[in-house]
Image: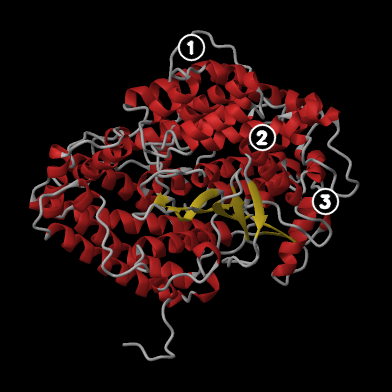
Amino acid sequence: MKEKNERINPFFLPYDTPHDTVPFGSIHTEDFEEAFIEGMKREKEEIDLIINNPEEPTFENTIIFTDTSKGEHYYDLLNRVSNVFSCMLSAETNDTLDALAQKMSPLLTKHANDISLNKQLFERTKYVYEHHGDLTPEEKMLLDNSYDGFVRSGALLSEDGKDQLRKLTEEAGLLTLQFSQNLLKENKAFQLHITNEEDLDGLPDTAQEAAKLAAKEQDKDGWLFTLDSPSYSPFMTYSTRRHLREQLYKARNTVCTHDNDANNFAICTRLINLRREISQLLGYETYADYVLKHRMATTTANVYKLLNDLIDAYKPTALEEVKEIKLLAKRIEGEKFEMQPWDIAFYSHKLRMEKFNIDAEMLRPYFQLEKVVDGVFGLATRLYGITFKENKDIPVYHPDVKAYEVFDQDGSFLAVFYADFFPRKGKQEGAWMTEFQGQWIDKKGKNVRPHVSVVMNFTKPTLEKPALLTLGEVETFLHEFGHSLHGMFANTRFESLSGTNVWWDFVELPSQFMENFAVEKDFLRTFAFHYQTGEPLPDEYIERIIKSRNFMVASACMRQVSFGLLDMAYYTMDKKFDEDIRTFEKNAWAKAIITEQLADSCMTVQFSHIMAGGYAAGYYSYKWAEVLDADVFSVFKKEGIFNQSTAQRFRECILSKGGTEHPMTLYKRFRGKEPTIEALLERNGITPTHITNES
């Protein structure tokens, strides 16, 4: 019994916060471990109650059992602490949290295996699967997922097979964690420190000011450039100092390849083999076969068909794009000039300016972050009738983070939305959406609303200017916001089927759909005003944006396809992988490569998506979903990009349904037919030669 004044772990109590949001300010680092241990203990107790129930197994007492004996304040503690901890590891980690993650990973994997390999629990689930009565489509989906989840987690294996699976999954869990920690450390370790002002030649004021602020924050003179995108990208695009571009490029493209503790080569090799061993233990020839059973693509043949069709359609244009850049570079530098990888962004920008007279820095003054936020929120209001209100009483995990209450069209509370915009030391590179609380309907009929978060790495404000974004950053915001809408509109009975809990080649549809608005004049008109003068983004600029939309689009497509080919090459392996990763990588994606590569560069060792981010054998999903999003947006273009009835149909058919039905069923309910590649080709200005497939 705790003493009266002894502090109680906040994870164990009802959150005394608005909408039961996470009380970040009250949580101590040691609270995580205690909550993890207690959460696993509680879940084991619930499993024991299920398997020791003498009654006939039913959907209610086995599949959706909830122990209510401990009163109304009994929470799913393990889920609660896991959601918070995983977000902190990505967005605000430190050495202590990293060490705790290493400690907890094998314990959590063992706990998960204890459940998925519990013979009595599987037998009860199997009985319900084979003898259930009438179920709703959502209940049937949950039951199917539950049964299939056991099978795919080894329930049908012998005891020796189960023991082997435990060892493999525990090792894989630790290695994915180590991969991510190494990548974060390597990315944050590199700095390009400039003290000679002449070496800033070509860089826009925003890049110089940000670099000066970065140096000042570390008590250094001069300017600091890092591998974070808001620092790296402008330098590669604008710097006239070719040797410094080379230095920065080589640093970024050799991350985690060096002879130090953050080298990821051995980890990647082992992860590739672990996943193959796991899939083969479960009866699949390759890991891709295992994964694709629960994907819209269904087979490796269909994935390769998509990727190869895209190569056929886009590669000729991509090669012409690169040729045009090289010709421009020779025209500027002389016929003997040989373009290198660190020159592409620089001369590509010059070509864009020559052809369209538009670039990121010309637009940046019109994309003040606060106005962009208003524009994105306003778009959601215009489409769906929802509204956002900042609530400073909602606790946040860092001063940069803002929290909003979201209200539905009828004024009812819909969700909590967190926005975390800027890079910092303990934050992974990139952008993502996550949840602190999913949506579900409890046994009393209460619709528990979600708490979603978008995390990004945008250009920070400086002493001289507010945060001014590039058009690319606006698109990133729209992308992650699309994921958040998928979460916020969730309206399902079961949390495991709500929001973004859908097949991975469907999950990118809501996010990529939102990106389409970034170049729509009527949308830009709502928020793009000069941060100093208040003047709207000129019509001439908007026309240039629209005309330049497909600049280098084929090259960008080939880049994504190359990643998809690399991913599939690793995870269609049916024998032990023991090749040199650099060599294998360059051979695997050769069909889609259109520019020279450095011998010592390596993508695999920093490819979080397929090594540690859940996209193994699934990176093709981005292109698969791009076909879907272009097809969906063609409906909006036809019926009106702000058409509320079309948006409501999209919300009802797709955004609110989560994973309650097969994604193609949901898609066809909205679209009326299966998607084709034509809308994507039309949007990209690509004339197909013989592409007639459906995807």
Give me the disc on residue 217: none
Taking depth in this image into account, of 138 and 606 the one nearest to the observer is 138
Residue holding disc 1:
691
Task: Give the amino acid at mark 2.
Answer: Ile
Residue 82 on image: x %, y %:
39, 62
Q: Report the Cα–Cα distance between label 1 and label 2.
A: 30 Å
Eye-nearest disc, 1 or 3: 1
Badge 3 density bin: few <14, some 14–19, many ≥20, Cα 10 Å: few
Q: Are marks 2 and 3 in contact (CB under 8 Å)?
A: no
Q: x, y (%) of residue 448?
A: 44, 54
Q: Is residue 571 left or right of residue 96?
A: left
Mark 2, residue position: 344
Mark 1 touches mark 3? (CB < 8 Å): no
Q: Residues within 10 Å of mark 2 (few under 14, many from 20)?
A: some
Residue closer to the observer: 356 or 54: 54
Q: Quadrant of the N terminus?
A: bottom left
**Residue ID for mark 3:** 205
In the figure, residue 263 lies in which quadrant? bottom left
- Sequence-first disc among 1 and 3: 3
